[in-house]
Amino acid sequence: MPFCEECLNDAASQPPPPFCAECGGPYGRPCCYGGVPCYAAAFHEGAARDFILALKYRNMRALGLAMGARMSKLAEGIEADCIVPLPLHKGSRRAYNQTELLARGIASRRGLDVEARAMSWAERRAPQSGRNAAERAGVSGASFRVSERLRGKRVILVDDVYTTGGTARAAIAALRKAGAVPAAVMLWSRRTRGSAEASDGPEEPQYLL
């Protein structure tokens, strides 16, 4: 399915300021020392929200690559050895990982390898969509398995949407435990209070192509 390049550019034209993966506040405060910066292309509203839902539920795979290419501009100064997309949940019915497509779009501009199989869920867990804030925040580093081949590597972690930050923090903890160095988290959009609810997006089989 086609999409409008100009509308995609507009959706990512006013990204949120970098923020801290630990507290969600502006990155660079004294309390962020040793923390991981997060970079989102847009707030989770309007066209930006529509694009991520189209990617996830309308089988618009080329859109993920284009979105990732725009995300790559957010952290051009970040030094990294590879890009790791957050994995699909165990048992997911989706035929592709939208986060991997975003990562490959970033990699196409950064010249980095995508380690798409280096991280996996260690447990069967329902998708984050539909969970409340407390449930989303209840993910731990033990929820992920990380490949030994990431040891010593500087990693850009990629996810689609930042809500509470629970998944990103758990993934960062798992990477560190495995000896990797999380350099940054890159996202398409960031939810804020008053933006669309966590449960947005259809889950019917016809959308899981």
Image: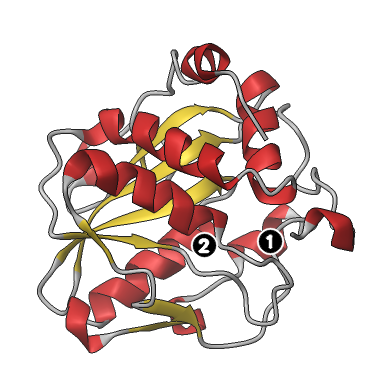
Residue drawn where x is 53% and y is 20% of the image: 8
Residue drawn where x is 57% and y is 14% of the image: 7
Judging by the rendered image, the residue that carries numbered circle 1 is 128
Q: Say if mark 2 contacts mark 1, CB within 8 Å.
A: yes
Q: Residue 146, percent across and down?
A: 34, 82
Marks 2 and 1, how far apart in space? 9 Å
Residue count near mark 2 (Cα–Cα under 10 Å), binned few <14, some 14–19, many ≥20: many
**Residue 6 can be seen in this image:** yes
In front of the other: 105 or 199: 105
Residue count near mark 1 (Cα–Cα under 10 Å), binned few <14, some 14–19, many ≥20: some
**Residue 21 can be seen in this image:** no
Kind of residue at badge 1: Gln
Judging by the rendered image, the residue that carries numbered circle 2 is 167
In the figure, 187 relative to 84: above or below? above
In front of the other: 29 or 61: 61
Q: Which numbered disc covers residue 20?
A: none
Residue drawn where x is 70% and y is 74% of the image: 92
- Residue 96 occupies which quadrant of the picture? bottom right
